[in-house]
Amino acid sequence: MSTQPPPNTADNPWPVRTLSLKLADWIHRLGQVWVEGQLTQINRRPGTRTAFLTLRDPAADLSLSLTCDPDLLRRSEVPLTEGARVVVYGRPSFYTGRGTLSLRVTDIRPVGIGQLLARIERVKALLAAEGLFDVRRKRVLPFLPYTVGLISGRGSAAQRDVVAVATARWSTVQFRLSEVPVQGPSAVPAIVEHLQLLDRDPQVEVIVIARGGGSVEDLLPFSDETLLRAVADCRTPVVSAIGHEPDNPLLDLVADLRAATPTDAAKQVVPEVAAELAAIEELRGRSANALRNWVRREEHLIDGLRARPVLARPHRLVDDQRAVVDRFRADLRRAIDHHLTAERHQQAQLAGRLATLGPAQTLARGYAVVQRIDDAAPHAVSSVDQLPPGAQVRIRVADGAARAVVVDPEGTP
């Protein structure tokens, strides 16, 4: 029967050789693998059958030791140099004697321009699908930034161009300079680190990533997915100023603004003081002219209003209305006088007719009115039958009246 090995405990530790053998066993099980990276060191040792290389991850601070036959390097169709992008095929090996890991390579293939461009297109399609190129994500640059963060190569022409042009345009602009490798395997990690530092600086209002022109391989870090996602996560607006006009790394699509050259970036970020002052003077002149024209129009309008009769002679309207009222009063008085005259004339006519028809005129012609006054109610007598003997009567004539007693009434013959 097989016996189980004792458990690994503090009282029963493994010796170093046991751990090394177990690690070697596990690593050797991985088998042959393909790995991509950038060559950062190539060491050909004369007189030996082994060449030593270092393969670095282009987007992270990680590297792996490689070993291969020197003939493998000499047979390469493209000369292998430090910084070259390659794909290697080999088996991981753990050397128990030194406790080191390396990859024994049997095939090295340089990554050609076509392959690099194809991989860039795949990254472009991926980020476009995620919306990192959407124009709605673009942030507006500040009109007059006080502090500009500048990521560029140490003492590079791009750095000098940006600083010189921006300072000439606006002398008070300040820069936070971050000098980093702009090509090679260490470019992406360094750029990402400094980008995050500038983004956390509250005084930095805009960040410019600048580099001069170069080949596709030289500009490859600026199409790296890690850098592009870092730029997309920035809260501070980022300006891409990579290469010359024909160069179009993917950073141009993710950045908030794409400048054709570093010089153009300085012009885009910092306004020109002379042009701005000229624009201010022009606006002041236009504002003054507009104000003067407005005052002239208002004065002309006021003069027109003042020239109107109602404002030139404000009492004229009252005078005109007063004349109308006086005319109406005169018309009304004439109408009333005419009406009174007509009424007086009619009254005179009626009075004349009344006088003609009244009893006074009849009495004046010799007639008399006889009233019986001994009854309970005196009344005029119109018949002899109303005058019995002894009846008391009142006889009214034109100039007065007299009382009498009926002695003998006489009937009509």
Image (cartoon, helix red, strand yellow):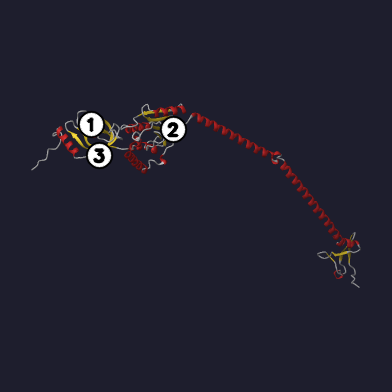
Position of 220 with respect to 23 (left or right) is right
Q: Earlier in the sequence, mark 3 or mark 1?
A: 3
Going by the numbered disc 2, the residue's amino acid type is: Asp
Looking at the rendered structure, the kind of residue marked 3 is Trp
Give the image quarter of residue 34.
top left
Characterize the local packing of mark 3: few (<14), some (14-19) or many (20 or more) Cα atoms within 10 angstroms: few
Q: Quarter-wise, where is residue 261 in the image?
A: top left
Q: Nearer the viewer, residue 163 or 281?
A: 163
Secondary structure, mark 2, is: helix
Q: In which image quadrant can residue 89 be found? A: top left
> Is any part of residue 14 visible from this angle?
no
Looking at the image, which is closer to me, 210 or 171?
Answer: 210
**Residue 285 in sight here:** yes
* Mark 2–mark 1 distance (CA, rounded to whole Å): 44 Å
Q: Secondary structure at mark 1?
A: strand
Which residue is tagged 1? Answer: 52
The quarter of the image holding the C terminus is: bottom right
The residue carrying mark 2 is: 264
Q: Position of residue 405 (x, y in %)?
A: 89, 65
Q: Which residue is located at x 33 percent, y 39 percent?
A: 114
For the residues labelled 3 and 1, the Cα–Cα distance comes to: 18 Å
x and y percent of residue 357 in the render? 86, 62
What residue does disc 3 label?
34
